[in-house]
Image (cartoon, rainbow, N blue to C red):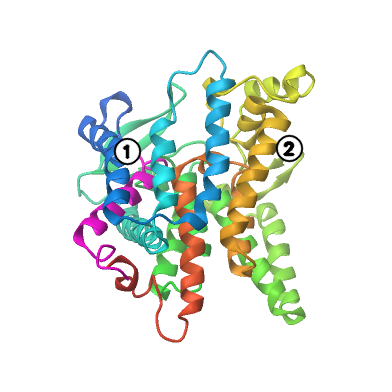
Amino acid sequence: MTRKNSSHFAKFVALVFAIRAITFVWLAFSAGGYMPIYEMFIAVIRYITILLGPFYLLYEGTIDRKRTKLLLPLFFYFLMLVLHTYGGYEGSYIHELVSISVFILMSEEMKMKIFTYFYKIIVYSCLVGILLYPAFILGLPIGFETVPFINDGVETSVYLKWFIWAIVGDGQWGLPRLCGIFNEPGGLGTICSLLYVAAYKYSTKFEKIIMLLAILLSFSVAGFLLVFLFYAITFIRKGWKYYVPLGLLVAFVLIAPKIDWGDEFVNNFVARFEITDEGIAGDDRVKPEFEKLYNQFLHSNDVFFGGGATYGGDMGTSSYKNLLIQFGFVGFGIYFILWLIAMLSVAKKDRDCRILLLIFIISLYQRPVPITSSYGYVLMVGGFLCIHYYKRNIRSTIPVKNAKLVVQ
């Protein structure tokens, strides 16, 4: 590792970029004036990368030319935003374009450093959230503050806020669900499941337990299903001896929603896994009015190139359908293929990297934003590189378990 990559300045830059990536799923108590200083902090972190990143590249004096192909889907997406925007382009995404571009051009060591900070911040923030959850259940007077949980301008539940951590109180499913530092429990469950897969080979047992507990307490259908899929693939890879336990596990998941567990809390949770005519009961990412607009889109001339960026974006929904309705099957299809080729160029033929890529793509069904955000690029590119690094040094070093090897 070079002297520059080992400097305090490099560590600071890596930390800022890691926090920058987390802000896309971070819970900022800003709506309704929850915590204005926190909102200001996130804004500063976002914009400082625009200045700090290019300066660091000049300071380092090296560019990872092998990864420049990753810029192609990024700039194609930006062109779509500029040239095909519903209501006119208003200058959005430039700060994200700069941040991701700088991250891509940084050395492989620096990208691993950023991923490691990203991973560690989330792991230990989850640990705090896990400790807060029983305090909430037991009603301990540790300073929880009740603030409204607002969705599309409507208060649907409440946050139990403790500094920058949160638990969502009784809501649609009657379950207090851990959000941690994220904007909603589903966000926590999804990112923890992806990081669990990304760092599975080299994370400690303690870190694995934290990730699984965070997913459990989030009661996130996506989080559970993504981890379940990971283990299903793992069992299949290990051979036919694991097919029976895998089949029993699948059967349990299918039968569990039909069992009366004698507890309303448990019944409400397992009910989210029930298979209905509309799909999985816990899949509530698309609202009826958006679904109506999407069906109209499928039978219109916009089906090829969409209605433009931001079209339908005011309906408060989160699904891959957002990107389809904005850019159409042709526009989004070209972007996705460019992105997939770029990711495969980093994943190479490594099976663990390709499993992570598959699970990440499946997660886009409900949360498509990561495919165009620094969060997604740090998680995927940084995650791939750390897997490669671990396998190259499997007999002597482990990058995340012994984080000093990456972040020093």
Q: Are marks 1 and 2 in contact (CB under 8 Å)?
A: no
Q: Is residue 4 magenta?
A: yes
- Closest to the observer, 140 or 65: 65
Q: Which residues are magenta?
A: 1-27
Inspect this view and state whether residue 362 appears.
no
Q: Position of residue 8 (x, y in %)?
A: 19, 60
Mark 2 residue type:
Glu
Crowding near pointer 2: few (<14 within 10 Å), some, many (20+)? few
Q: Is residue 238 above or below residue 57?
A: below
The residue identified by callout 2 is 278
Inspect this view and state whether residue 197 appears.
yes
Drawn side of residue 315 relative to residue 146, left or right: right
Q: Quadrant of the N terminus?
A: bottom left
Drawn side of residue 298 relative to residue 13, left or right: right
Residue farthest front in this picture: 61
Secondary structure state at the residue bearing disc 2? loop
In this view, the mark in front (1 or 2): 1
The residue lying at 45 percent from left, 80 percent from top is 393
Secondary structure state at the residue bearing disc 1? helix
